[in-house]
Amino acid sequence: MSGICRLVGLWLAFSLPALGAGPGDMYADNDPQDQADVVQIGLWTVHATNKTQGVDKGLKRIAKHLHNLNFTGFSLLGKDRAGVPVQGTKRFNIVGQKFVEVTVLERSEKRVRVRVQVHSPKGKLLDTTVSIRRNGFFMVAGPKYKKGVLVLPIFARY
């Protein structure tokens, strides 16, 4: 577990409300009637570094939250999404031979509780359980990547 501290010295976790029509519009094609016990999980992969300046325009809706991090440049590397049933797990492959597993443990009218695990070829980097507001997101930051770190906003929509 001491490896977590070496990653950057920070794993940030925010449970934030969805931002207007922002991240939620990435699920517009899903019919909520067919998804009664399913949570739409979105995972964005962001590269944060001090080698560049500015925020990728694809990150506009979460930019104010990224500015709280101690980096000057943010690039969107990818977006992924999946419907995950309660007690189900989805594996998301991300850059740097890493992957994220998100397990939906339970959901209520106001919140969803998820287990988030980040893995690298060397083993598990993070294993935590968080509560995310309905239609909100949680942000994890820390795994080193190309002279910066990865920031992983995880969205929960239902």
Image (spheres, rainbow, N blue to C red):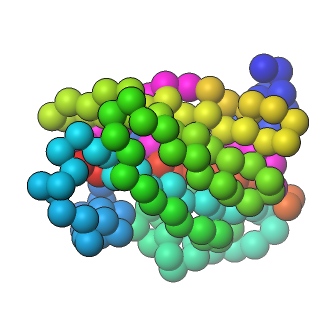
Q: Which residue is drawn at the image coordinates 80% and 56% (left, top)?
A: 96
Please check the rendered image and state whether residue 143 is part of the magenta-colored stretch, yes or no: yes
Q: Is residue 61 above or below residue 16?
A: below
Q: Which residue is drawn at the image coordinates 45% and 43% (left, top)?
A: 138
Seen from the viewer's position, the closer of residues 54 and 92 is 92
Q: Does 78 sit left or right of 19 as displayed?
A: right
Q: Is residue 20 above or below residue 136?
A: below
Q: Position of residue 130 (x, y in %)?
A: 44, 28
Determine the residue located farthest toward the left in the rendered image: 33
Magenta segment? 128-145
Q: Position of residue 51 (x, y in %)?
A: 81, 68
Q: Position of residue 25 (x, y in %)?
A: 29, 69
Q: Which residue is drawn at the image coordinates 51% and 55% (left, top)?
A: 43
Q: Position of residue 116 (x, y in %)?
A: 54, 34
Seen from the viewer's position, the closer of residues 154 and 97 is 97
Quadrant of the image for the N terminus? top right
